[in-house]
Amino acid sequence: MTDSGLVVARWTPTSVTFTVAGVGLLLALSFLPTVASPATLDRMTTLFIYVILAATWNALAGYGGLVSIGQQAFFGLGAYVTIRLSNAGVNVYTAVVVAPLIVALFSLPLSLPMLRLKTSEFAVGMWVVAELIHLLVNLDPLIQGETGISLIALNAYTVDQRNALTFWIALAAVAAVLAILFVLLRSATGAGLQAIRDNEEAANSVGVRVVTVKRIVFVFAAAGAAIAGSLWLATAISFQPKTYFSAQWTSYMIFMVLVGGLGTFEGAIIGAVIFYAIEAAFGSMGVWYMIGLGAVALLFSLFLPSGLYGIFGARTGVQLLPVGYWLRDTKSEPAVGQGKAAEA
Amino acid sequence: MLGTVESGEGRLPGPQIGAAHTEGIVLSAEGIVKRFGALTVLDNVAFALSRGEAVGVVGPNGAGKTTLLSVLMGALEPTAGSVHYLGQNVTRLPAAERCRVGIARTHQVPKSFSGMTVFENALVAAQHGGGHRASEAYDRVVETLRLTGMLRVANRRAETLGLLDRKRLELARAVATDPKVLLLDEIGGGLTDGEAGELVSTIKVLRERGIALVWIEHIVHVLVQVTERLVCLDSGKIVADGKPRDVMKHPDVVRAYLGSAVG
Ligand SMILES: Nc1ncnc2c1ncn2[C@@H]1O[C@H](COP(=O)(O)OP(=O)(O)OP(=O)(O)O)[C@@H](O)[C@H]1O
Ligand SMILES: [Mg+2]
């Protein structure tokens, strides 16, 4: 690949093992509806939705430096557009899949003004956008304000069919979101994205078109939040604007990413699994549950800003998913290494 | 044009380095004013760099050297004045676009991509700024890391590097973008004689490739080994511009340095 026996490796034995195991797990999960109970499928769907929310918010904030506190805008829109499509006669499960694509298209022009904003203005600006969209959706006569509406077209399916179909779509969505993010991070654009994460000014200095790269992430994150919203609707059936356009969704995303590890591919997934477990254990505690989540998120951002995966990665140096590059000297291993010896 | 030294050498054409000057000016700034609020940091600065030329920039702390570099790079928009590159007005062109057409800089306080390895730091530059793809980009990076003495730490995450290596990484990253003009901001501070010698030979290699240089440095004796022209900036004005020997004797320069022995 390069001169004098130097080659660029991208996969390590650990990362090959882990990636194969991950893909294998996703394939195995696709058979789950044939064996698992409806309740299990429903719980897994919820977990997948959390992984999508965490992974896409992490892409946005952790990599793009775009800390949005208004991602509920796209979550709510995903559900709302699903209702609208279904009402227009589109098959309900087709609507669940197509709605996020429509929301992604909508997010493209929205990115033009939003990405001109400075960091803090962007965060608040996104929240304002979410509130505005919430109000506009309330004006739709079909929704009847906060009364809301149900996705009645689901009645055409049995409960078992619904659970299985929603599960499969959620599984496909989580696989697609992670695969797209993986491919993106491994590409030249992804290298630019990581550079922006680490130092935006320097990224500009070396020719990274920062706004273009951010726009890709913005649209990707909007699509992710939207499919999470349409899937949530498919499991919850009823659509009440204030539930879907609630800032609570964004606070969940922040929690998952802070705990798992901001700006790491693996961290967001770990954060989602942890959040899911915490919710299962303490979710019934109401207000105290929310206070507990806030406290944990605060403690992490103060004392463990790199999250659980960040600590794991720093301690072990292990990279589970190969998004990086490794220069190997095939002639005199390991001549180009960590460089400790050469520096002495 | 401002700040001509009285040696009679004039500004352009300056000292001879082959046919460089007959090919004209590669980068120029005219009437540059930069204010931060009430503070005027650059006060009507004019500057021109010929093809393949190497110019050293000296001046006391706070003189506006880094600010001038940022204006040339496009990281800062001037309050007034214009910047031309290869005959085109690039005053409004953002830094990333200027990098893609051949202007690169280092940062005085290193701005490494801390979570990425040294190799990846340079790779971003080769892919985006240099427009290289796939294995062509890899080759470019390996060659650049070798030239700048960074190959030995290619796989180290940038956040684990010491200050000297971070400065070398600044240089490596800038070179990996294949610049025609290289803007260097105090990459030689704190070096031992041996290290300074290595840096000088690296810079000489870059000059042989025809890259034009603007190099801000306090250590004048290092600077003069690779530059044939010196510019002295003081309080946002160019107070001298010409042959290093003449510039260092210039009364305004001596005054700017409060008579301290520079060079
Ligand atoms: N973004 C900014 N906002 C306000 N003032 C600034 C800004 N950047 C630079 N300055 C001021 O402009 C003046 C010139 O700064 P500059 O960094 O260009 O000096 P310099 O010649 O590079 O100095 P040094 O040798 O210390 O690096 C200083 O007084 C500095 O405080
Ligand atoms: Mg400076």
Image (cartoon, rainbow, N blue to C red):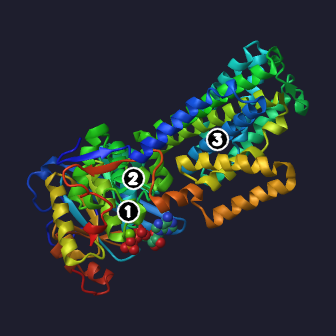
Q: Earlier in the sequence, mark 2 or mark 3?
A: 3
Q: Nearer the viewer, residue A183 or B260?
A: A183
Comparing labels 3 and 1, the label whose residue is closer to the camera: 3
Comparing labels 2 and 3, the label whose residue is closer to the camera: 3
For the point 22% across and 56% down, which residue is it? Answer: B146
CB of residue at label 3: within 8 Å of ligand 1? no
Question: Which residue is disc 2 drawn over?
Answer: A205
Secondary-structure class at tag 1: loop
Q: Give the amino acid at mark 1.
A: His
In the picture shown, does residue A336 fall above or below A100?
below
For the point 60% across and 41% down, which residue is it? Answer: A56
Residue A179 horizontal side relative to residue A142, left or right: left
Question: Badges 2 and 1: C-beta atoms under 8 Å apart?
Answer: yes
User: Residue A131 occupies which quadrant of the picture?
Assistant: top right
Please provide percent x and percent y for residue B183.
30, 59
Question: Which residue is disc 1 drawn over?
Answer: B107
Q: CA distance from mark 3 to mark 1?
A: 38 Å
Question: Which residue is disc 3 drawn over?
Answer: A51
Q: Confirm whether residue B259 shows in the render.
A: yes
